[in-house]
Image: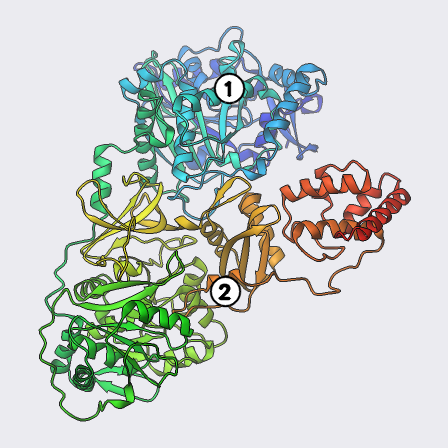
């Protein structure tokens, strides 16, 4: 049904601002709401009359938005008069936010609630936030300004500028063309507290607000909008650790043109801001650059292609500033629209004569209220420091107040907990006395009770003492994963000795290096070795474990005795020995048992090597709690079907395992999981957690973290099946008697939302390294002198508590001038459908450093690459891609990244893909292949899918200009990325024969010179 006079109505165009809104959602649902409490003495009837008088002069309200085969199926009709306000008797959200009948000219819906309070719902296609703020004063005065500026005039003015080919229009378009060049490489700030997902325009927001104190407001001065915005972007750049950010400035041009003030219409637009700064730059210098960009933006704002940029990276995180409604009127504004709905996170500043109010608007699906509150508090601290100390480098500005700093230090500490006086070996003896017949250790064919295990350990201890093993010495164990290995560990402890595990599969050079450094008193082997090395050795078979005295040797255990020495890879290439004492191991096992309720787990699987401490959770978690440790054989630890049979047949209810190792073992039919899973050694991806939930919705999953130097683990997180899973699990609990800090380069705590380096202190910190200094690895905390271990792991501090790992400090790489953390790309890959496992490494490429992705899963590399390219900027999309059936692994189950790095590129098979049909296609393919470091690529191969990027395009274009003596623009390659398509595009101008001749001549010349074609 239409409206009267529609057939004679004049159609006029939408403005660029209106066009940018269309298509976001159903036009009738694009609604802004104003809630205004009337001054005392105003009656409901008087309020209604005031609304009618204030709205009547605005011609934009005399419009209908009707379907037509025009712009996105709509046209705007100018009517003789505005449709009457649709007054409602019910002011509930359900009524006021119901779709407007735009085609009938229903642009305004209103109701009066008790107070009286006006609730005004207006189409966002005819009024923005500034319009409704202006209406507040006009309604209070019951009239609009006498010479109100009409929005149709603004549309005509904008249209004339857009059509202007003379100096003004051309200069503005050129400005934005230059400014937006390369904008695909800029990304929206990705804050630590953001949950996975994307924003929907109708999603509600958290709104947290605060007043700026008088001292800070006074220091800001008159240019408040620029200073506030500059501090916002500087803070986000510092929080994310990335200076190449894209943000959006929601700007109302009525602030620039006095005649437009008080007008109704859609004047708000989002201008892109690309933040490229340095932490070493002073805030004064930062603001000078920001002011220059802002001034240039405003000069050309009418030519900004806001419609074409709709949905780009800069529309996700924003800033806007508004003049508050006239606060001298005795009316109270209860609600005005916030920042544009496209923003998932935006800071809004409201300026008034009463002061400066800031409000942070955050999508409830993506941010918690706590994260919004902490971010706003952090901004206020940062803003104050920036304006009071503007000559300090941005990266050095204090951003924590003393209360927040104290809270962070307190949150870093785990609870105090009494672990008891007895070592793990003493706990085994305890269980042997209390539950002697309970199963202690088993494998495929045997089960030993606690009494049997205890007696065997004592007998072996007596034998080892006779071979020279004594308190304070080391026993090297070159034994396979077996019950006998557990006996040997306990036997060493019964004498006050520690153990050094040697993996039987190690190369001789690695074994000899460890033995030379550790200098054990004895090496216990399963079989004799020809290249045994200089240390004394004994064979396990030489000892009688079945008969003889079973009493414990006479030794009083000490907390400071060595439990074990593990060797980790060193940055120098030489393995480093990490000595762990009995007290440190006891604290871990007792604290982990308490935090994860491990006493309820009665049958643990040991499926990883003891040459790393990953399996110690299973090994000692079982023995400490009187449970049974079931040793998995090599097949059960590597074959999915055998693993499933092992879990079922042995009634396994708990395991500690590397996430990617478990992922590989869950492939195939019949997969199953224990009731409790402790994941550690790598980031635990969301896809794995979802797979576990499919197999057993009741399974309890813990994410666990800790370097060897801090005794197995110091943080964990229990997965809550009722919450949305992040791409990578966080760590939210510090184990008892430990402390985990996230610090900056000055060893100061970083605030919630920021990235820093993890430092660990407390009861599990090792004494240092065996036979070597640890300069710079163990440091003193500046606040109390506590000894801390510098892990080298980067982590985000989460606003809701805990941390999320962000890769290694020593793995960061510069890709085309942008700092990239490969772990961040891995996280994005692991979030793609079908990806089971992923690893991303940096390597040398033809145009500098580049990324290489290794993926296992169900899908196609080209599809995953395209998905990743939609999430990440170009420089973060790996150039090399390799699909693996399974990943190479170290003995502890972790991905062998060194083996990945040594893998040759997955070369395209000879003859695969289309062959070139002429000399031009051959020359183009050869040029592309040469830049990619390949012998050849197929004629129908996509240059970008093969690893090409914008820098290589520049080099390709330069090469083609030289070889073919033809002008080639980079955009042609982007639009025609295969040799076939590019050849066709080059020949489209009608010079095919000439180009073929030049291509043949160039190929002959290159062949004669012995150069690649």
Pick the front one: 15 or 999: 999
Pick the front one: 266 or 919: 919
The alpha-carbon separation of the residues under discs 2 and 1 comes to 50 Å
Q: Residue 773: x and y, percent?
A: 27, 55
At label 1, counting other C-alpha atoms closer than 10 Å, the crowd grade (few under 14, some 14-19, many 20 or more) is few
Q: Residue 709: x and y, percent?
A: 28, 59
Tag on residue 581?
none
Q: Mark 2 points at which residue?
A: 899
Secondary structure found at label 2: helix
In screen coordinates, is 151 left or right of 796? right
Q: Are marks 2 and 1 in contact (CB under 8 Å)?
A: no
In screen coordinates, is 752 left or right of 2? left
Pick the front one: 876 or 20: 876
In screen coordinates, is 856 left or right of 490? right
Secondary structure found at label 1: helix
Residue depicted at 39% across the width and 60% down the height: 682
Q: In which quarter of the image is the N terminus?
A: top right
Question: Is residue 557 among the parts visible in the rendering?
Answer: yes
Task: State whether residue 38 is above or below residue 145.
Answer: below
Tag on residue 292?
1
Q: Does label 2 or label 1 sit earlier along the sequence?
A: 1
Q: Residue 387: x and y, percent?
A: 34, 21
Tell which tag, 2 or 1, sits nearer the viewer. Answer: 2
Task: State whether residue 697 is above or below residue 266.
Answer: below
Task: State whether residue 479 is above or below residue 200.
Answer: below
Residue depicted at 65% across the width and 44% down the height: 952
- Name which quarter of the figure residue 107 lies in: top right
């Amino acid at each position: 049904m239409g409206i009267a006079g529609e057939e004679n109505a004049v159609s006029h165009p939408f403005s660029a601002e209106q066009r940018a809104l269309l298509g976001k959602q159903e036009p009738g649902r694009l609604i802004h709401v104003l809630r205004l409490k009337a001054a005392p003495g105003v009656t409901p009837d008087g309020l209604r009359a005031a609304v009618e008088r204030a709205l009547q002069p605005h011609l934009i309200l005399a419009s209908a938005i009707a379907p037509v085969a025009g712009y996105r199926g709509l046209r705007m009709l100018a009517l003789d008069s505005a449709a009457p306000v649709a007054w409602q008797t019910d002011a509930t959200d359900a009524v006021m936010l119901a779709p407007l009948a735009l085609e009938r000219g229903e642009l305004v819906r209103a109701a009066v609630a008790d107070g009286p309070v006006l609730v005004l719902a207006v189409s966002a296609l005819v009024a923005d936030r500034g319009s409704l703020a202006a209406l507040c004063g006009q309604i209070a005065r019951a009239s609009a300004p006498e010479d109100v500026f009409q929005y149709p005039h603004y549309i005509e003015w904008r249209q004339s500028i857009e059509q202007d080919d003379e100096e003004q229009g051309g200069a503005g378009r050129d400005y934005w063309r230059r400014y937006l060049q390369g904008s695909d490489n800029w990304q929206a700030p990705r804050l630590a507290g953001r949950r996975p997902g994307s924003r929907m325009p109708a999603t509600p927001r958290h709104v947290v607000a605060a007043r700026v104190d008088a001292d800070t407001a006074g220091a800001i001065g008159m240019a408040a909008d620029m200073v506030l915005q500059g501090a916002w972007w500087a803070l986000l750049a510092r929080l994310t650790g990335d200076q190449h950010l894209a943000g959006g400035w929601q700007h109302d041009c009525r602030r620039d043109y006095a005649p437009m003030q008080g007008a109704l219409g859609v004047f708000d637009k989002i201008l892109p801001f690309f933040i490229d700064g340095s932490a070493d730059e002073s805030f004064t210098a930062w603001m000078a650059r920001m002011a220059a960009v802002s001034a240039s933006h405003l000069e050309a704002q009418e030519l900004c292609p806001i419609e074409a940029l709709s949905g780009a990276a800069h529309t996700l995180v924003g800033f806007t500033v508004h003049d508050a409604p006239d606060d001298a009127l005795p009316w109270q504004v209860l609600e005005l629209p916030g920042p544009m709905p496209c923003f998932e996170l935006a800071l809004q500043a409201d300026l008034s004569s009463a002061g400066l109010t800031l409000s942070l608007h955050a999508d409830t699906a993506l941010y918690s209220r706590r994260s919004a509150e902490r971010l706003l508090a952090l901004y206020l601290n940062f803003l104050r420091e920036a304006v009071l100390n503007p000559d300090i480098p941005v990266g050095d500005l204090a951003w924590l107040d003393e209360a927040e700093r104290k809270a962070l230090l307190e949150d870093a500490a785990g609870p105090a907990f009494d672990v008891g006086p007895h070592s793990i070996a003493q706990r085994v003896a305890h269980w042997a006395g209390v539950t002697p017949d309970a199963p202690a250790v088993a494998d495929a064919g045997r089960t030993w009770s606690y009494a049997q295990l205890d007696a065997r350990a004592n007998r072996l201890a007596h034998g080892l003492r006779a071979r020279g093993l004594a308190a304070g010495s080391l026993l090297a164990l070159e034994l396979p994963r077996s019950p006998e290995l557990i006996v040997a560990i306990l036997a060493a402890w019964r004498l006050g000795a520690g153990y050094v595990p040697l993996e039987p599969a190690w190369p001789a050079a690695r074994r000899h290096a460890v033995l030379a450094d550790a200098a054990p008193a004895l090496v216990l082997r399963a079989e004799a070795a020809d290249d045994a090395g200089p240390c004394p050795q004994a064979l396990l078979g030489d000892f009688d474990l079945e008969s003889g005295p079973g009493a414990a040797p006479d030794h009083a255990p000490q907390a400071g005795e060595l439990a074990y020495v593990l060797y980790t890879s060193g940055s120098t290439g030489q393995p480093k020995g990490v000595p762990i004492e009995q007290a440190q191991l006891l604290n871990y096992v007792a604290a982990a048992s308490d935090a994860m309720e491990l006493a309820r787990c009665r049958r643990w699987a040991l499926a990883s090597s003891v040459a790393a401490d990953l399996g110690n959770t299973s090994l000692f978690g079982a023995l400490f709690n009187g449970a049974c440790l079931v040793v998995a054989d090599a097949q059960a630890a590597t074959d999915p079907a055998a693993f499933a049979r092992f879990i079922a047949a042995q009634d396994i209810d708990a395991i500690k395992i590397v996430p990617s190792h478990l992922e590989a073992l869950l492939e195939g039919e019949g997969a199953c999981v224990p009731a409790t899973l402790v994941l550690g050694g790598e980031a635990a991806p969301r896809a794995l957690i979802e797979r576990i939930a499919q197999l057993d919705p009741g399974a309890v999953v813990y994410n666990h973290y800790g370097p060897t130097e801090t005794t197995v683990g110091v943080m964990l997180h229990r997965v809550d099946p009722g919450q949305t899973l992040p791409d990578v699990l966080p760590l939210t609990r510090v184990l008892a008697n430990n402390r985990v800090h996230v610090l900056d380069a000055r060893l100061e705590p970083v605030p919630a939302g920021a990235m820093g380096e993890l430092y660990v202190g407390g009861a599990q910190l090792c004494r240092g390294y065996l036979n070597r200094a640890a300069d710079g690895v163990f440091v003193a905390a500046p606040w109390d002198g506590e000894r801390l271990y510098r892990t080298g792991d980067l982590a985000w501090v989460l606003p809701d508590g805990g941390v999320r790992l962000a890769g290694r400090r020593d793995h960061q790489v510069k890709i085309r001038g942008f700092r990239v953390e490969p772990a961040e790309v891995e996280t994005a890959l692991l979030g793609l459908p079908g990806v089971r496992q992923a690893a991303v490494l940096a390597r040398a490429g033809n145009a500098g450093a580049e990324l290489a992705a290794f993926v296992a899963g169900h899908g196609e590399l080209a599809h995953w690459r395209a998905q990743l390219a939609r999430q990440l900027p170009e420089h973060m999309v790996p150039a090399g891609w390799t699909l693996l059936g399974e990943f190479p692994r170290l003995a502890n189950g972790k991905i062998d990244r060194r083996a990945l790095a040594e893998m040759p590129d997955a070369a395209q098979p000879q003859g695969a893909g289309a062959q070139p049909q002429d000399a031009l296609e051959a020359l183009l393919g050869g040029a592309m292949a040469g830049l990619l470091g390949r012998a050849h690529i197929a004629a129908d191969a996509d240059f970008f899918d093969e690893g090409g990027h914008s820098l290589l395009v520049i080099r390709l274009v330069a090469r083609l200009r030289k070889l073919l003596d033809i002008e080639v623009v980079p955009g042609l390659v982007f639009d025609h990325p295969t040799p076939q398509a590019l050849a066709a595009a080059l020949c489209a101008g009608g010079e095919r024969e000439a180009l073929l001749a030049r291509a043949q001549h160039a190929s002959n010349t290159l062949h004669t010179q012995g150069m690649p074609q």
